[in-house]
Amino acid sequence: MDRTIAREALRLLEAHRAFVRATVVRAVGSVPGKIGATMIVREDGTTLGTVGGAALEERVKELAAQALRDHRGDLHHFDLAKWRTGGLPSLCGGAVDVAVEFVAARPNLLLWGGGHVAHALSKLLPNLEYDYSVADDRPDWVGLDRFAGAERREVVSPAGLWERFDPATFTHLYLLGYDAGKDLEALASSLDRFPNYIGLISSASKRAHMFAALRERGYDPAQLARIHAPVGVQIGAENPAEIAVSIVAEVIRSIHPVPRTSRDRARNREKERVRPSNT
């Protein structure tokens, strides 16, 4: 791989940005992009590198945009001969296979609340190479002794959360606080400013009361639908360590979505009706 491509891929990973890497993996006959030719397509549609230019490259860009939407890539075959059925408008005459690889944004979690669940999470995230920061308004709960691996440890009020942190740098926000009123303030400010995944640790009662309060503040159903509550994949987790495992599973599922059959969807709808709470 070209060093410029490798450096950009690393930069995007460190910046927690998703991208697509398109690579020519097979070439037959006369083609402009040889095996190994690579192009990076960023979330904003800008590119670096080339897989051969012309109509081939434009088609690969379209497939890259689709991969970014679906969080899933694929292997694609192209005939560079306009006289063949399905061929691109090209006179090269050869054919290529291009691997369109979706590279998920490397997770960067912001944990509001440095309590027991957050502490348990801090033991799991480094092994996955997931970055995290922690914020709390209690100094004793965000110290180096509790979160040695955190990128940042900040003592901040819930209302000041996004004054201290840049929301664009995080892929996930988990509200794991000790006070429902403060969780509500952090949640309200996050719905307006944080664009990505929001998880709220909650019982059914806490969720109902907080959603009602948010509706009174003018938040609409589409905004409330962004909130994942209770947090985690439902595996019957009860103690902080088990809840932390369920949250990590939720993060993995959010960046690598698994296709579901109609039967799976029906089964999951049934599970939602009897979904247990975090408390």
Image (cartoon, helix red, strand yellow):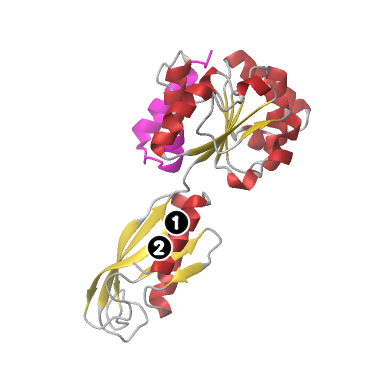
In the foreground, 255 or 214: 255
Q: Which span of residues is magenta-colored?
A: 251-279
Is residue 81 depicted above or below 249 in this figure? below
Q: Residues within 10 Å of mark 1 (few under 14, many from 20)?
A: few
Is residue 255 depicted above or below 271 in this figure? below
- Mark seen at residue 23: none
Position of the C terminus, as image quadrant, is top right
Is residue 64 depicted above or below 106 in this figure? below
Residue at 59% of width from left, 23% of height from top?
Answer: 114
- Is residue 95 at least partly visible in the picture? yes
> Residue placed farthest to the bottom in the image?
91
SS under mark 1: helix
Return the residue at label 1: 10
Residue 3: x %, y % from top left: 39, 67
Does residue 209 appear to the left or right of 4 in the view shown?
A: right
Is residue 72 depicted above or below 196 in this figure? below
Q: Which image quadrant is residue 229 in? A: top right
Kindly indicate whether the residue at mark 1 contacts the one at mark 2 (C-beta within 8 angstroms).
Answer: yes
Residue at 57% of width from left, 15% of height from top?
Answer: 203
Distance between the Cα atoms at labels 2 and 1?
Answer: 6 Å
Query: Disc 1 residue type?
Result: Leu
Does residue 67 appear to the left or right of 165 in the view shown?
A: left
> Residue placed farthest to the front in the image?
145
- Mark seen at residue 6: 2
Residue at 48% of width from left, 48% of height from top?
Answer: 105
Residue 87: x %, y % from top left: 31, 76
Residue 107: x %, y % from top left: 49, 42
Q: Is residue 235 magenta?
A: no
Q: Is residue 266 magenta?
A: yes
Q: Residues within 10 Å of mark 2 (few under 14, many from 20)?
A: few
